[in-house]
Image (cartoon, rainbow, N blue to C red):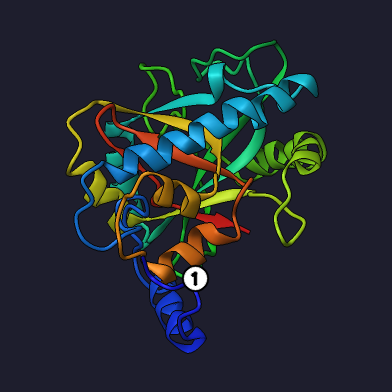
Amino acid sequence: MSNLNDSNHETNVEKTSHQKRPIGNKFSQLVDGHPLLPIDCIVAESFIEKAKNGMLPFLNKNFVNYNSNGVYQVNCNLLREICEVMEENNAVKLNFTLVEIDSNHPKLDVNPRITGGMIYMVASLQSNNEQTIAENNYLIMNAKSDQTLDDLKISDQVFSEYKNLYDNGYDLKLKQYFSSPSGENTNSVVYDIADLKDTLGKVTSSKFDVHMCEVSDVLAIIEENNLGDQLNVALYEEHFASRVRQLTLVFDSGTDFYDMGSLRP
């Protein structure tokens, strides 16, 4: 396995490269070569299991509401339409921002533990420098089947209202549980359009299950399961090393897991 004490100069160069291009499925790129076991499934399932034993019980105890089992859904065709709209607007990033939304929202089909507000993720179009493109926010998670993409579009003002509810409520609770080096926790997950299109071209299912989970000790998982003898140090350090116990989203097609997103902050 690669030495984590490799030259800082080399690692920083590789990190910069990752930031300037699509990052692909981070799970499958964690090790070079071809491990015998499916690394994406093992690492993703460790994230899901960590949330079941940590984050979700904590949220229950603190009356933070979310969809059943911390699992949301998104229709693949809606994501394909989003990609088309992104191209029309010269957007190259899709940002899923954590917000609080009414669990009785008429355009959504959700199954929260209790009534009232609940954690949700709004998808917003962004430019290459991650500047949000005005009035392009969408409620595509758990959208009712009779809703078109235009139906699911919300204004910047409504999006801001949802975000303020979260920032002044649930986010404060989450910060009591999560502990990142910055003292903050994930507020959004950013996906590159090239990654989205590549993934959508590979899946045969009609939807993704989207797990709201937490990052586990990835290096320990790799070592425990003998998943490879050549760790991708730059990718590991950029996306996982300092993110243990931080909230993330994992997309599950039923046969593969995808963690293409970059966590913010």
Residue 193 % position (x, y): 33, 56
Q: Is residue 220 found left or right of 105 in the rendered image? A: left
The quadrant holding residue 41 is top left
Q: Amino acid at mark 1?
A: Asn
Check disc 1 and report the residue beneath it.
Answer: 129
Residue 262 in view (yes/no): yes
Residue 156 % position (x, y): 61, 46
Residue plotted at (81% across, 34% down): 169
Q: Secondary structure at mark 1?
A: loop
Residue plotted at (41% across, 34% down): 150
How packed mark 1 is, by other alpha carbons closer than 10 Å (few <14, some 14-19, many 20 or more), is few
Residue 56 % position (x, y): 65, 26
Q: Nearer the viewer, residue 147 or 34?
A: 34
Residue plotted at (25% across, 42% down): 37
Q: Relative to residue 15, is residue 49 depicted above or below?
A: above
Q: Is residue 210 found left or right of 202 in the rendered image? A: right
Q: Nearer the viewer, residue 144 or 170?
A: 170
Q: Nearer the viewer, residue 192 or 148?
A: 192
Residue farthest along the bottom direction in this orientation: 9
The quadrant holding residue 122 is top right
Q: Quadrant of the C terminus?
A: bottom right
Q: Quadrant of the N terminus?
A: bottom left
Q: Is residue 232 found left or right of 213 in the rendered image? A: left
